[in-house]
Amino acid sequence: LVQLRCRNFRVLSLLPPLIFDAIIVSLEISLFYSDSAFTFKLFVITALWVGLGEAISCFVLSPLLYFGVEKTELKKYLN
C-alpha cells in the first residue's frame, strides 16, 4: 500500500487515519455527546461526517502542505 505514489506523495498512507478517526471519533460522539440513546443510524451518520472532514484534511490540505514545503526553502529547515 505504501508504494502507490502521486508525485512522490504517498497516497494510501492517508487511509488509516481516515478510517480510524471515522470509527473511533464517531463512536465517541455517538456514545458520550448525544442527547438521545445510541443508535446505529446515529453512528453511521456521524461516521460519514467525521470521515468527510478527515478526508478533506487528509486528501486536500495534506498534499497542499506537502507540495508547498517541497517547492519552498522550508524543506531544508525540516530535515
Image (cartoon, rainbow, N blue to C red):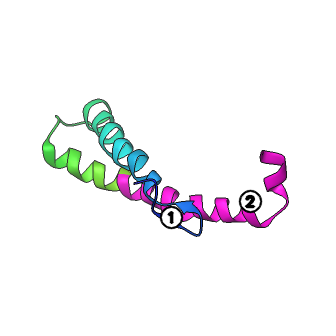
The stretch in magenta equals 51-79
Farthest top residue?
32
* Residue 39 in picture, x, y percent from top left: 14, 41
Badge 1 local density, few (<14 within 10 Å), some, or many (20+)? few
Tell me which residue sits at (31%, 42%) in the image: 26
Of the two numbered discs 2 and 1 in the rendering, the one whose residue sits closer to the viewer: 1
Side of 52 where 41 appears, left or right: left
**Chief secondary structure of the magenta span?**
helix
Identity, as a three-letter code, of the amino acid under mark 2: Val
Up/down of 24 relative to 3, above or below: above
Taking depth in this image into account, of 27 and 34 the one nearest to the observer is 27
Would residue 77 be found to the left or right of residue 44 on screen?
Answer: right
Q: In the rendered structure, which disc, 2 or 1, sits on the residue that comes first in sequence?
A: 1
**What crowding class fits label 2: few (fewer than 14 Cα within 10 Å), some (14-19), or many (20 or more)?**
some
Quadrant where the N terminus is found in the figure? bottom left
Residue 35, horizontal then vertical, whole percent: 25, 36
| Residue type indicated by callout 1 | Arg
Name the element at disc 2.
helix
Name the residue that disc number 2 marks: 69
Q: What's the residue at 43%, 57% (across, down)?
A: 12
